[in-house]
Image: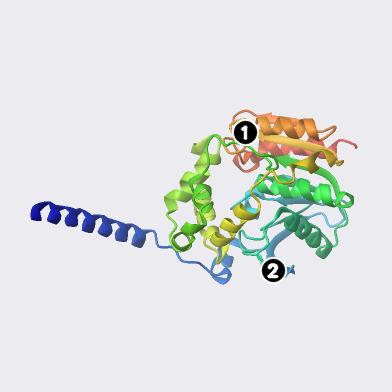
Amino acid sequence: MKTLLKATLGVVLLALLALGVGLAMNWAPDRSVAELSPRWAPQPSRFVLIDGMQVHLRDEGRRDDPEPIVLLHGTSASLHTWDGWVAALAPGRRVIRMDLPGFGLTGPAPDGDYSLPRYATFVTHLMDQLGVQRAVLVGNSFGGAVAWKTAADHPARVSRLILIDAGGYPYESASVPIGFRLARYPALSPILNNVLPRSMIESSVRNVYGDPERVTAELVERYYELTLRAGNRQALVERFRQSPGGEFAAQIPQIQAPTLILWGGRDRLIPPSTAQRFRQDIRGSALVVFDTLGHVPHEEDPAHTVTVAQAFLETPR
């Protein structure tokens, strides 16, 4: 009996030691905006006070564009996800992108409200702040849900709509990034707010790409560091809790703006069948599927996807 007890105690001690080493190796406390900004907010980035937040944004391209293009990223992404699109669009259009509340360098919302209506209101307030009356809204994933919700709630402010693997309907994922799975359990917050394995971020990013080999070390580093922005990890938990998806789907058929739907055929997070639902519910909309791309086709292959978007934007209404 004593031998068994000693052996059990030894196993427990080894497990605790392994846990301690794992926590030490992956210990990742919050980082401040001041610490992160030199790398992730050089010119033309700036910070603008909107709804009590210093919002990280970039406003580039033609200043005389009557209908600027506003780009909205998805969950846990940032304005950097649009770099390839901006390079193609900015020479001829005014292009505005920002880190949405709860993400990137903008960080958590002071009022703690991460509901979809609140995000839609935020978009209109940002447009007001920048002197934009009407805009083309482009959104990916959760940003796509924010885009169509804005078009539904504020139709006079949206001239056209581009939805890229957008949220909006209830769906069943074929595969969910591990970071998203863990964020759906608030009880894990005390651990997740201080521990962040870089391997978990890499796995999550590779999970949403159609071709994981396109994921570079630099890309993983960007997602990793911006997740560490103070308050972002708790905001992610709240975003999933307050905006689970599908709660405003009945509004989608109300959308009147000309709409282009882009989708990655290898999207395992929001299935391509969802694209067909958008196509059926938004009258006059067009759908293009990129067979080899995943959940973030604009980031995975910006040159191919932006060309389709440009053709849509050049088509007379």
Could you tell whether 155 is left or right of 16 in the image? Answer: right
Could you tell whether 315 is left or right of 209 in the image? Answer: right
Which comes sooner in the sequence, label 2 or label 1? Answer: 2
Residue positioned 57% across, 37% down in the render? 173
Confirm whether residue 221 shows in the render.
Answer: yes
* Residue where numbered disc 2 is placed: 53
Percent x, y of residue 204: 50, 45
Q: Which mark is residue 219?
A: none
Residue nearest the viewer, comparing 46 with 171: 171
* Residue where numbered disc 1 is placed: 271
Could you tell whether 258 is left or right of 143 in the image? Answer: right
What's under tag 2, amino acid-wise?
Answer: Met
Residue positioned 59% across, 36% down in the render? 172
Rounded to the nearest angstrom, the CA distance separating label 2 from label 1 is 34 Å
Residue positioned 76% across, 38% down in the render? 309
- State the quadrant of the C terminus: top right
Residue nearest the viewer, comparing 78 with 94: 78
What's under tag 1, amino acid-wise?
Answer: Pro
On screen, residue 112 above or below 219: below
Write down the quadrant of residue 50 in the picture. Answer: bottom right
Percent x, y of residue 101: 66, 60
Q: Secondary structure at mark 1?
A: loop
Q: Secondary structure at mark 2?
A: strand
Could you tell whether 192 is left or right of 253 in the image? Answer: left
On screen, residue 32 above or below 176: below
